[in-house]
Every structure is written in structure tokens, then in C-alpha cells.
Amino acid sequence: MGHLTDKEVLMRIVQPQMSRRSILSTLVIGAPAMGVLGALNLAGATPAAASPSGADFLQMAESKTGCPFIWGEAGPSSFDCSGLVQWSLSQLRISFPRVSGEQINACLSAGLEEARATPGAIMYMPGHIGISCGDGTYCEARNYGYPVGIYNNDPGWTDGGLVPGLDYSGAPSDTGSSGGVASDGSLVVDGYWGSATTQKLQETLGLTADGLVPGQPESWKKQNPGLTTGWQWVSDSQAMGADVISKLQAKVGAAADGLIGPGTIAAIQAHFGTTQDGVLSEQSSSIMALQKALNEGKF
């Protein structure tokens, strides 16, 4: 597999029996000209024209405090966990998937600590979803006997996310365990590749600096916990890649398909002389090397 591009690896994993016509359809549907908003729509979330905040989302969910948990219900007087999320966003004119697994996949990735500190961030674990209050508590429709309300115990969250179309600018900034910016404007060298690291990389590569990496395959998300905010994970068949990754691949000598797969990661690691294991872990030494190079203007 060392001689395959990341896109070829992905196609072998996801589409071993896909017909030629289906492959062509997938490529047409995911045309790069769609841009970021098109990628977000493919993920199942349609941003509203206005920009309600994460706090607005949280407030909408909290307005249903006391409503009973009933599996399969999505309001207005009873809810299951994902029904509460979907209903609350619909009140802000944001269309969102119905089930929890699709909901977290429609989000921009966020580290767990960042999500816990961000009002209106999504909290997810397999089979359950809730909304962060930003202070270590969570608004949820938790289970039978546990109505919509604020809960202060962590049920075992595994992922955090930010809803496309919500404004989180008033929330804690992209710092700490999410690859943020220090007070002097330099990147925090913490080994987490978040929006700030992407933005600095985009500036260095002469691209629009929006801090987003769209069109990445969701099957590689869990393997790379060092990738945090700004990464947009879509179903593998719709993963069309991102310009910033294509430019990065050209820099490190990897095939330029726009996907941050194991081949690209190994090339990044080889470029910086770090262990070539093809993954970006938490506090990744490879990400730290990238951040240092960007700070020093040497990349």
C-alpha cells in the first residue's frame, strides 16, 4: 500500500465493488467547484443565511427543560437525544441530520476539551449526543427517566464538534489542545492541528486563509486525534480533498490528491524527520514540527 495514493487507498477501503458509473457520479457530485458550502451541504448540514450563535442553539435546547425522553421523538413536547439537537437547530433555520452518528459527521471536528469549553458545541458518544454548556455541564435528552435538562456528569463522550452555520466567535478561542494562537500571534506548538494551524499553513502556501480543511474521509478521523478544529469529515465516497492538503502534499513529495491519508502523513513525517507511522496522534511530534516551521517561516 506504500505505492498507492491516499485516494487510491480510500477507494480500496470504501468502494471495492463500486461500478465505474457510480465512481464517475461520485466525482461529479463532489466537484471541487462546490466549495466549502457545497461540502457542508454534502455532509448534511445547511447553514442558515443569518449567523445564530452556539449560545443561541444551547438556549433553544434549554427552553425544553423538563420535556420527557421518548425514543424516536423530535419535539416539540418530547424528544430523544438527537431529536433535541435537530429540533433546536431547526428553530434557528439550520437543517441538520436526524440521527446522532450522522449529526456528528456533519460537524466540523473539535477536540473534546475545546467542545466542553464551548457553549453550543456538540458532544458525542456512540448512540448518544448532547450539547455542551461550556462549563463542563451538558444539555441533553439523556434517557428514559432523564428528561431534557442540564447534566453535570460526563456519560463517556468520545467526540466533539461545531455545527456549520453557527457562530462560535464569542466562545473560547482556538487555543490550548486545539492548535491555537499565542498572545504574540505565533502558533501554540502543542501538537494539535486546529483551525489556527491550518490558517497559518494556508497563508504560507498563498491560499485563502479560512482555517478550514473540507472534504476529508470520516473513516480516518478517529485514527488521527491530533486533527481537531476546522477539519470537515464527510462520508468516504464524498471525500474530494482540499486545496491546502494538495499544496502541502506537493511540498512534502506526496501524491497531490487533497486527502490527509496515511501516505501523506508518512510523507510529512519523513519531511520533518519524525517517526513515520502514518498517523497524527494527540500532541503529535510531527504537528509540533510543522507548527515550529510555520512560526519560523521555514516551511
Image (cartoon, rainbow, N blue to C red):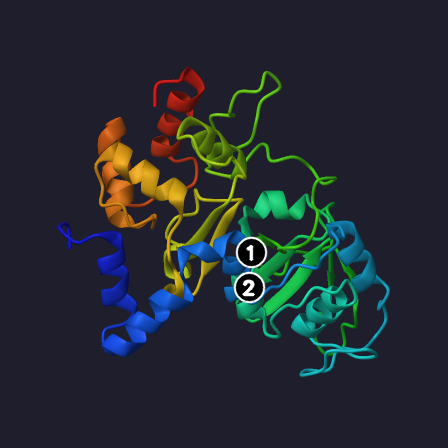
In whole angstroms, how far apart are the C-alphas of marks 1 and 2?
6 Å
In percent of width and height, residue 35 lies at: 49, 53
Q: Nearer the viewer, residue 22 or 143?
A: 22
Contact, mark 1 vs mark 2 (Cβ under 8 Å): yes
- Judge from the rendering whether residue 269 lies leftward or rightward of residue 108; answer left or right: left
The answer to which image quadrant residue 153 occupies is: bottom right
Per the image, label 1 sits on a secondary structure element best described as helix
In percent of width and height, residue 7 lies at: 27, 57
Image quarter where the C terminus lies is top left
- Judge from the rendering whether residue 84 lies leftward or rightward of residue 159; answer left or right: right
Would residue 280 be visible to someone looking at this image? no
Say the numbered circle drawn on residue 200: none
Q: In percent of the image, x 71 and y 53: which residue is there?
A: 120
Q: In percent of the image, x 77 and y 62: which residue is there?
A: 92
The vertical placement of 36 against 191, above or below, is: below
In percent of width and height, residue 268 lies at: 28, 36
Q: Nearer the viewer, residue 222 or 237?
A: 237
Q: Nearer the viewer, residue 65 or 228?
A: 228
Image quarter where the N terminus lies is bottom left
The residue that label 1 is drawn on is 37
Callout 2, which amino acid?
Asn
Callout 1, which amino acid?
Leu
> Few, some or many C-alpha atoms within 10 Å of disc 1 (few <14, some 14-19, many ≥20)?
some
The residue that label 2 is drawn on is 41
Per the image, label 2 sits on a secondary structure element best described as helix
The vertical placement of 129 against 162, above or below, is: below
